[in-house]
Image: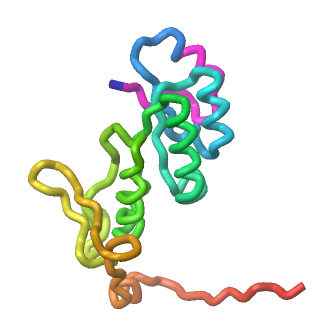
């Protein structure tokens, strides 16, 4: 259905030349670090699909702006994960409910990388291969402070510099 990031991450122009020669859509992933780069890539015809990773593009606000840009240009998106704990996964699931996330995402069960995870209830994959949106307030899960404390290797307090 797609070829994901076949060339170097910073090579929008060669992706555009390659995409013009292919029927199969190119999906840009590592190239898309900002909304501005996505706008450039879309304008150049470098891709027909984009993978949105909040950790790579600067958070959820930028991810929503990127989603909206892609939707306005008829570029479908899918959600990519970056080895988040359940805290990040819960937020990612909520993001991936936006209407232009039309392709299967890269969101997994919360125990996949962290066991026990830092949240309750855990994010689990249903028998049909789907993950439900956590229904609680905020991101839908409770952060287990005891597990966060056990997983913490170093604690630092940073104070703002006064001008």
Looking at the figure, which quarter contains the N terminus?
Answer: top left
In the depicted structure, whether residue 1 falls above or below residue 139: above
Q: How is the image coloured?
A: rainbow
Percent position (x, y) of residue 18? 54, 15
Instruction: Judge from the rendering whether residue 109 lies leftward or rightward of residue 128; answer left or right.
Output: right
Residue 148 or 135: which is nearer the viewer? 135
**Residue drawn 40% across the image and 88% down it:** 149
Image location (x, y in percent) of residue 53: 48, 50
Which residue of the protein is positioned furthest toward the right in this rendering?
Answer: 163
Magenta span includes 10: yes
Image coords of residue 15 (percent x, y): 57, 22
Q: Residue at x 53, y 51 (%)?
A: 64
Residue lying at 31% horizontally and 64% vertically, measured from the top left: 113
Q: Is residue 107 left or right of residue 65?
A: left
Residue 12 found in image quarter: top right
* Drawn side of residue 145 relative to residue 70, left or right: left
View extreme (top): residue: 21
- Which of the 4 image quadrants contains residue 119? bottom left
Residue at 51% of width from left, 44% of height from top? 67
Quadrant of image for the C terminus: bottom right
Q: Nearer the viewer, residue 112 or 33?
A: 33
Q: Is residue 123 above or below residue 31?
A: below
How many numbered marks, from 0 up?
A: 0
Front residue of this view, candidates 108 and 134: 134
- What are the residue bounds of the magenta stretch? 2-18
Instruction: Assess whether residue 14 is covered by the magenta stretch.
Output: yes
Q: Is residue 77 left or right of residue 64?
A: left
- The vertical placement of 160 against 24, above or below, is below
Q: Which sits in the foreground, 37 or 10?
A: 37
């Amino acid at each position: 259905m797609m070829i994901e990031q076949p060339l170097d991450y910073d090579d929008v122009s060669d992706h555009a030349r390659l995409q013009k020669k292919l029927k199969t859509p190119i999906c840009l992933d590592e190239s898309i670090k900002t909304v501005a780069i996505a706008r450039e890539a879309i304008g150049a015809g470098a891709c027909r699909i984009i993978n949105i990773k909040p950790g790579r593009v600067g958070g959820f606000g930028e991810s929503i702006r990127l989603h909206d840009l892609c939707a306005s240009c008829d570029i479908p998106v899918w959600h990519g994960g970056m080895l988040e704990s359940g805290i990040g996964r819960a937020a990612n699931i909520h993001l991936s409910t936006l209407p232009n996330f039309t392709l299967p995402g890269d969101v997994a069960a919360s125990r996949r990388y962290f066991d026990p995870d830092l949240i309750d209830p855990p994010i689990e994959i249903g028998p049909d291969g789907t993950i439900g949106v956590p229904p609680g307030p905020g991101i839908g899960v409770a952060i287990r402070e005891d597990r966060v404390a056990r997983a913490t290797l170093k604690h630092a307090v940073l104070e703002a510099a006064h001008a």
